[in-house]
Amino acid sequence: MPWYKSTRASYYKHLFRNMIVTIIGVSFVPVFLVSFTIYYAFFTAYQEKINDHLMALVENHKKQIDSFLSNRLADILFLSESDSYGQFRDQAVLDANLHSLRNSYGGIFVDLGVVDADGHQVSYAGPFKLSNVNYADALWFKKVMRDQVVVSDVFLGLRGFPHFIVAVRRFEGDLPWVLRATIDFIAFNNMVENIRIGETGFAFILNKEGELQTKPRYNFNPAQGCYGQFLDCSKPITSDIHIDERRDELDNDIIYVTALLKNRDWALVYTQKRSDAMAEMRWAQRISIFIFVFGGISIVAMAFILSWRMVNRIAESDQAKEMMNKQVIESGKLASLGELAAGVAHEINNPVAIMVEEAGWIDDILTEPEYKNNHNIEELQRALKQINTQGKRCKDITTKLLSFARGSGSAIRNMQINEIIEEVITLSSQRAKYANIEMHSTLQPDLPEIRASETEMHQVFLNLVNNAIQAMEKNGGSDRTIHFKSYVRDGKIIVEVTDNGPGIPEAVLGRIFDPFFTTKPVGQGTGLGLSICYGIIRKMNGDIQVKSTVGEGTQFTIIFPIQ
Amino acid sequence: MKPVEGNHPPIRLLLIDDERGFVATLSKRLAKRNVKATQAFSGREGIQILRKADFDVVLLDLKMEDMDGLEVLKIIKIMIPDLPVIMLSGHASEETAHNGMRAGAYDYLTKPYDIQELIDKIASATKSDDE
């Protein structure tokens, strides 16, 4: 019977639940703790690594851009020192210089111009028509007049094209003059635009006013959102490299790395979505979650299966223990009853023997001539005979009690149980015929031998047959049979004695092996027959079981161990 | 009631049993059947009587207080090996009786018994003794 159907189902259910919870708890808690510890440590380390990497990247580029700018400035400074103001005013000289610059640096230098102290461009070499242009109001001009050198912000200027200017101021006598060069915006832009990582990483340069100095990869308005605040207020940038993280209006975490360059005039900003920067981390995260979920499912399944099996085992052993307990109680009951029976037999039989003897003596006396004509003589003799008969009955009972208590004591030898069954059938056939009962048998030939006492075996089977005959006699009916069957199963010899008599009511079935239990009228049965059978079979380490259905019949199954 | 033999001298029987009432009654019943029973109420007493007188047969209870019936039987068999001994088993145990048979008893009876059964066994024991 499976445990969930047993009478203690709720107990086992409770046990089952506890086991599952314990197994899952014990397995999950450490996994959780370890996973989260490792995850946290790894996440932090990885984040640091990403930040360091980005900062190194930006710093590297900052240096590159800084050195590009200062080199270009140095180029112009060097150029300005190579010739005099007068020379530079000569268009041909300026053209030649531009030519040699472009030869050396590719298309970086777009044009060259010489501007006098009033802001007039006195000579110009380049693709645009910018001769005699007045730069007096231009921001870069004012700056260069003040600071001697300038790298301007990017602006459209007169040419309507984004560019910036590198200019140096020199003196011709007391009069200052300016040599200026325009740097190709596209060449410069490429330097910045090359900083690109992942899908969302890109870099740009802002000036102090928050205006873009390069053309970023993605269109966005630098004045909007946090870009504008960056340089102004929120966090005054103190160190050269600064890393920060903000959340944009689309709820993306964005990393900003900022480096100041060009004497803190410009800021090189690199931005990337956090999720993009941590793409590898996401991947690892996803695998971990998958393993975690998969492992979790395995643990739960294992907990379920393990608990199920354990509870099954426990229920099985509980059942076995219960059955054993029952047997122990049963045999203990029989043993103590046996001792009592033996004592009673000894103590009762002697007085009964004396009583019978005394009755015999009275009988002897009554044969004397003087009593011969007494009119009560027949009554007295009848009474004495009754005393004698009842005395014999007492003796029968004590004999049975003693054989129940310690067996009848006949020699134990190897024997074929089939032979015993055939003898019993022969012995009972006369009585069975008289009661209109048929006896037959299906015996498996060549059964292994058992070790038993012949008289005990006779006793067992005769008892069963007698009981069956008595039960069927009483109830009459036709087609009454007693069937013997012997066979081997699981290394044991099984003998079944089946009748189709009236059957044994269930209320009685559990007690039929108890000593002194009888359904026969008082004086007709001792109630010891089946308990003696039980005692004999149990003593041989065998077992005797009964199955019965009222109205259909009774089957006794005797199980003998093979020696 | 059938005596052992009509005009024959009575059979001399030694009855050893510690149940005094039983011994007295049985002696009287045997006397009526031409068996003269000498009474002994313990194993020890029985053996002492055996030393002084001759008997045709001994009726010996198996269970007595002073001595086990089987012990008494063994002593009797050493003293007078040819003397037939019929055992009376008071506690209905065939096993003890079987042991007695093995120790050389002539026959055994379990109490209570039919007097005729006893007389038959005595007759057969003494007859074979005569032969």
Image (tube, rainbow, N blue to C red):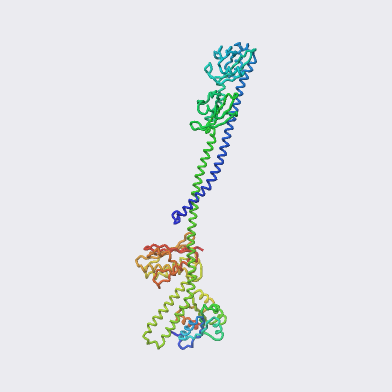
Q: Is residue B114 left or right of residue A203?
A: left
Q: Is residue A209 above or below residue B33?
A: above
**Along the line of sight, which residue is nearer the eye, A348 or B101?**
A348
Give the farthest residue toward the front: A233
Q: Quadrant of the N terminus of chain A?
A: bottom left
Residue A238, image quadrant? top right
Residue A353 position in % (x across, y down): 46, 79
Q: Is residue A124 visible to the viewer in this orientation of the structure?
A: no
Q: Is residue A205 above or below residue B88?
A: above
**Along the line of sight, which residue is nearer the eye, A56 or A16?**
A56
Residue A194, image quadrant? top right
Number of marks in picture: 0
Residue A329 position in % (x across, y down): 48, 64
Residue A483 position in % (x across, y down): 41, 64
The residue shown at (46%, 74%) is A398
**Along the line of sight, which residue is nearer the eye, A487 or A302?**
A302
Residue A191 position in % (x across, y down): 57, 24
The residue shown at (56%, 86%) is B52
Q: Is residue A265 visible to the viewer in this orientation of the structure?
A: yes
